[in-house]
Image (cartoon, rainbow, N blue to C red):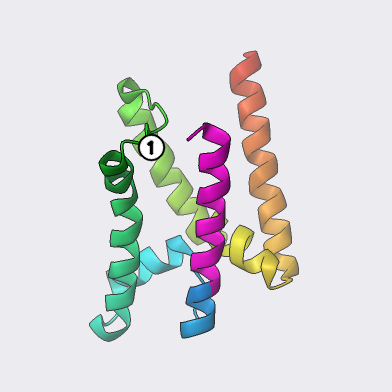
């Protein structure tokens, strides 16, 4: 399976899972909110969130079992990846939502706040890639 097909299938599965979660439970599939509520929520409302997160973490295992090559990650940059993850998590909580909550669920629900948030983080990401690739910094 080529990289474009992986992206199409992955995007379709993300959309389908977000739609099914909203349809059957009335909940939005915002990963930062799901993770945050696992930490502070009561177990009754926490169980489905734990299962959701286990499903996210199981995806690389499924790739491996099916023999699908995963995208390459430079493991030499682990500390930078960890710092980036912490900053993204902080930004997601500060912005009252993450890429999945705003970009997938919020825009599909026609939320102006989500549209602005998505344009902001996509613009910041594009600017970061430009700076990193062209050595502007």
Magenta region, residue range: 1-19
Residue highlighted by disc 1: 83
Furthest-top residue in view?
A: 135
Q: Position of residue 2 (x, y in %)?
A: 51, 32
Is residue 96 visible from the viewing direction of this image? no
Location of residue 60 by image quarter: top left
Please name whichever residue, 91 or 43, is drawn nearer the observer in this view of the structure. 43
The residue positioned 32% from the left and 30% from the top of the image is 79
- Crowdedness near tag 1: few (<14), some (14–19) or many (≥20) residues, C-alpha within 10 Å: few
Q: Is residue 21 above or below residue 131?
A: below
The residue positioned 40% from the left and 68% from the top of the image is 34
Q: Is residue 107 above or below residue 134?
A: below
Residue 98 falls inside the magenta stretch: no
Q: Position of residue 82 (x, y in %)?
A: 34, 37
Q: Position of residue 3 (x, y in %)?
A: 52, 33
The residue positioned 67% from the left and 24% from the top of the image is 130
Please name whichever residue, 12 or 57, is drawn nearer the observer in this view of the structure. 12
Q: Assign the C terminus to one quadrant of the image.
A: top right
Q: Main secondary structure of the magenta part?
A: helix
Please name whichever residue, 42 or 28, is drawn nearer the observer in this view of the structure. 28
Residue 15 falls inside the magenta stretch: yes
Helix, strand or loop for disc 1: helix
Q: Is residue 118 above or below residue 17?
A: above
Whether residue 95 sits left or right of residue 80 in the image: it is: right
Q: How many marks?
A: 1
The residue positioned 56% from the left and 52% from the top of the image is 11
């Amino acid at each position: 399976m080529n990289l474009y097909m992986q992206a199409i299938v992955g995007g379709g599965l993300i959309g389908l899972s977000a739609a099914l979660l909203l349809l059957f439970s009335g909940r939005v599939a915002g990963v930062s909110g799901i993770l945050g509520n696992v930490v502070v929520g009561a177990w009754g409302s926490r169980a489905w969130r734990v299962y959701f997160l286990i499903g996210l973490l199981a995806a690389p295992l499924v790739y491996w079992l099916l023999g699908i090559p995963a995208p390459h990650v430079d493991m030499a940059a682990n500390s930078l990846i960890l710092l980036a993850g912490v900053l993204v998590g902080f930004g997601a909580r500060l912005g009252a939502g993450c890429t999945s909550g705003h970009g997938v669920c919020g825009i599909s629900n026609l939320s102006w706040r989500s549209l602005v948030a998505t344009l902001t983080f996509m613009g910041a990401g594009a600017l970061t890639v430009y700076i990193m690739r062209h050595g502007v910094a």
